[in-house]
Amino acid sequence: MARPQDTRPEVVASATDLEQVARTLAEKLFGPAGPAWGTTFEDLEELVVQVGRTVSRELLRQALQKQAAGPVPADRQPCPGCQQSTPPTDPEPRILATRVGDAEWNEPAADCSRCRRTFFPSVGESGD
Ligand SMILES: [Zn+2]
């Protein structure tokens, strides 16, 4: 079981926005009267867990896509294997398994001719 972690300051600072997002989703999912009587707690819990994971994946995808759209910093261009400077190529689809499911976005990759391998400057080598 994962160890409980302290709430990040960014989450505390976003509390009002997160409440508004939850209020909007609750209104769309359940209507103004809330969930129908007879809805089980287990059904509600499963639904909100799935919604939370979907929001988390989308937030992750948007953040990673914005980061990848900017220029790759010079200190991220060397190949992690041989340290040869390797300019990034056109963005490629990227998928990473996360705690909330697969995150997908497009990111510049780099091909090292010396090591004959591809890596992503944001997090290093491709997982193959
Ligand atoms: Zn290399």
Image: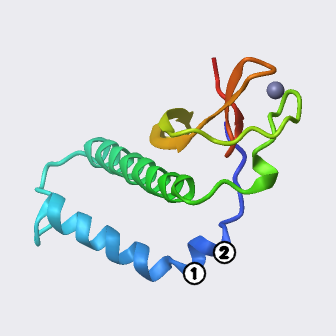
Residue for point 88% across, 35% down: 83
Residue 126 appears at what percent x and percent y? 65, 27
Residue 9, percent from left and from top: 66, 74
Q: Are marks 2 and 1 in contact (CB under 8 Å)?
A: yes
Please state if 79 lies on the left or on the right of 56 as rendered: right
Looking at the rendered image, the quarter that the N terminus falls into is top right
Residue at screen point 59% across, 77% down = 12
- Which quadrant of the figure contains the C terminus? top right
**Which is more toward the observer, 95 or 46?**
95
Q: Secondary structure under badge 2?
A: helix
* Residue at 56%, 57% in the rendered image: 67
Q: Give the residue at x 85% y 35%.
A: 84
Seen in the picture, residue 99 relative to 71 is either above or below; the reply is above
Residue sitting nearer the eye, 124 or 25 = 124
Q: Which mark is residue 101?
A: none
Q: Which mark is residue 13?
A: 1
83 lies left or right of 62: right
The answer to whether residue 85 is above or below residue 5 is above
Quarter of the picture for ligand 1? top right
- Image coordinates of residue 53 in percent, x first then y, are 41, 46
Residue type marked 1:
Ala
Q: Residues within 10 Å of mark 1 (few under 14, many from 20)?
A: few
The secondary element bearing badge 1 is classed as: helix
Q: Which residue is mark 2?
A: 9
Q: Position of residue 24 (x, y in %)?
A: 24, 71
- Which amino acid, mark 2? Pro
In terms of depth relative to the viewer, which is nearer, 19 or 60? 60
